[in-house]
Amino acid sequence: MDTKTIEDTEVEVETGVTSQADEATKVINTHVVMSAGFGLVPFPIIDVVAIAGTQYKMIGELARIFGQDASQERIRLAAISVLGGGVPTLKATVLSSLVKGVPVVGTFLGLALLPAIAGVTTAALGRVFAQHFEAGGTLLSLDAKVIRAHFQAEFEALKEKASKKPAAAVDDAEVVAA
């Protein structure tokens, strides 16, 4: 007869359960990599659309993890309210994409810049929404000014951390976990 002590059962329960924060981190890390990959798409604007779609999907998955109602329209409006209001990151993303249209030099410059900008933007966006949902916020209770300021602070912190390392040494998971 196989017997288990209370301690054995507790260990099984602890190791079998992942927290919402752990799940959110995995979702963010996955979407950071996807966004950076879409930044390598050589066609201007198509890359930005793919990156935005990845970010919308990430917000939807984060909402699901935290038990939020998340229609596509609400997700889109929430992302636009954070990224839209004149935030320099959106302008940098679009500009990096458009630079790819310049023959030879623009292609290489765009391919060098956009994956990094896309990854950092996605990481910052994911962190902001995960923290908002974790604090009990919803897509409807989003205060655009507060979230936008929080996003900008996250973006700057991640950008600074990423710029201190050579591009080849930057680990996406490390950037997001920072």
Image (cartoon, grey):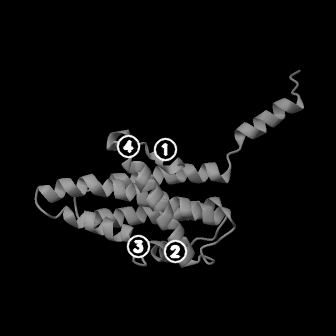
- Answer with mark 2 or mark 3, whichever residue precedes in sequence: 2
**Secondary structure of residue under mark 3:** loop
- Answer with mark 4 or mark 3, whichever residue precedes in sequence: 3
Q: Amino acid at mark 4?
A: Lys
Q: Which residue is labeled 3 in the image?
A: 87
Which-is-in-front pick, marks 2 and 3?
3
Which-is-in-front pick, marks 4 and 1?
4
Looking at the rendered structure, which numbered label has been put on residue 156? none
Q: Label 4: how many residues lie within 10 Å, few (<14), some (14-19) or many (20+)?
A: few
CA distance separating discs 2 and 3:
14 Å
Q: Which residue is labeled 4 in the image?
A: 165
CA distance separating discs 4 and 1:
11 Å
CA distance separating discs 2 and 1:
26 Å
Which-is-in-front pick, marks 2 and 1?
1
Q: Which residue is labeled 2 in the image?
A: 78
Question: Are circles 4 and 2 on residues that touch, CB within 8 Å?
Answer: no
Pick the residue in front: 165 or 31: 165
**Secondary structure of residue under mark 1:** helix
CA distance separating discs 4 and 2:
32 Å
Q: Amino acid at mark 2?
A: Ala
Q: Which residue is labeled 1 in the image?
A: 174
Q: Residue at x 28, y 65 (%)?
A: 46
Pick the residue in front: 107 or 87: 87
Question: Are circles 4 and 3 on residues that touch, CB within 8 Å?
Answer: no
- Answer with mark 2 or mark 1, whichever residue precedes in sequence: 2
In the rendered structure, the answer to whether residue 131 lies left or right of residue 48 reads: right
Which-is-in-front pick, marks 4 and 3?
4
> Which residue sits furthest top?
1
